[in-house]
Amino acid sequence: MKFVATDVAGAFIVEPEMREDERGAFARTFCAETFAAQGLASVYPQCNVSTNARRGTLRGLHFQIASKAEAKLVRASCGRVFDVALDLRPDSPSYLKWAAVELDSARHNAFYIPAGCAHGFLTLEDHCELFYQISETYAPDLARGVRWDDPAFAIAWPFSPEIIGARDAQYPDFSNEVVL
């Protein structure tokens, strides 16, 4: 696996090293020892899947606070998405910066998002599915979000979403109190 640093401290694009032969291809997409050696979360007690029928579907930006802050390893198992990590860690050198990657099921790449960062994505085509490995279990009382189009972040989405959930559309303007 190849780990490519992004503008968000501790966030990495994870690219598999495909080995091809007459049968097809094979690649390791996760190894606990390799992730631990990189200083990344290597235990994922929860896995989730997100299915999205239409291009232009936006989900996020979501995170959990305090004792259940989550690191995420996200990959597209079907389709392509514009995937975003937003640094909400006040002590981070990349505080309030964002990084994005196009996750593509044909490329088998993934995005490692450290705890303390919000995560969201915009589908680039119909019939997208994302698979998440998450370092913490879901705690509804610690779940938070920030608005996808908040000018405090100036995320350069490739286009405006066509489908967005009511909760995601109604997050208030960013405030430091949101993440504490």
Image (cartoon, helix red, strand yellow):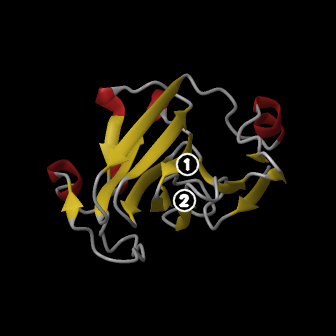
Dividing the picture into quarters, in which one does residue 35 lie? top right
Question: Looking at the picture, how far across and down is residue 93, in whole percent?
Answer: 63, 62
> What residue is rendered at 76% in x and 30% in y?
32
Q: Nearer the viewer, residue 164 or 156?
A: 164
Task: Find residue 49 and report its horizontal and vertical position in percent.
Answer: 42, 37
What amino acid is labelled 1 in the image? Arg
At label 2, which amino acid type do we have? Leu
Residue at screen point 32% across, 74% down: 151
- On-image quarter of the C terminus: top left
Report the residue at 56% width, 31% height from top.
Answer: 135
CB under 8 Å between discs 1 and 2: yes
Q: Which residue is mark 2?
A: 103
Residue shown at 44%/52% (left/top)?
A: 119
Q: Position of residue 57 (x, y in %)?
A: 29, 60
Question: Left or right: where does residue 147 sit relative to residue 113?
Answer: left
Q: CA distance from mark 1 to mark 2?
A: 6 Å
Badge 1: how crowded within 10 Å, few (<14), some, or many (20+)?
A: many
Label 1: element kind = strand
The residue wearing badge 1 is 75
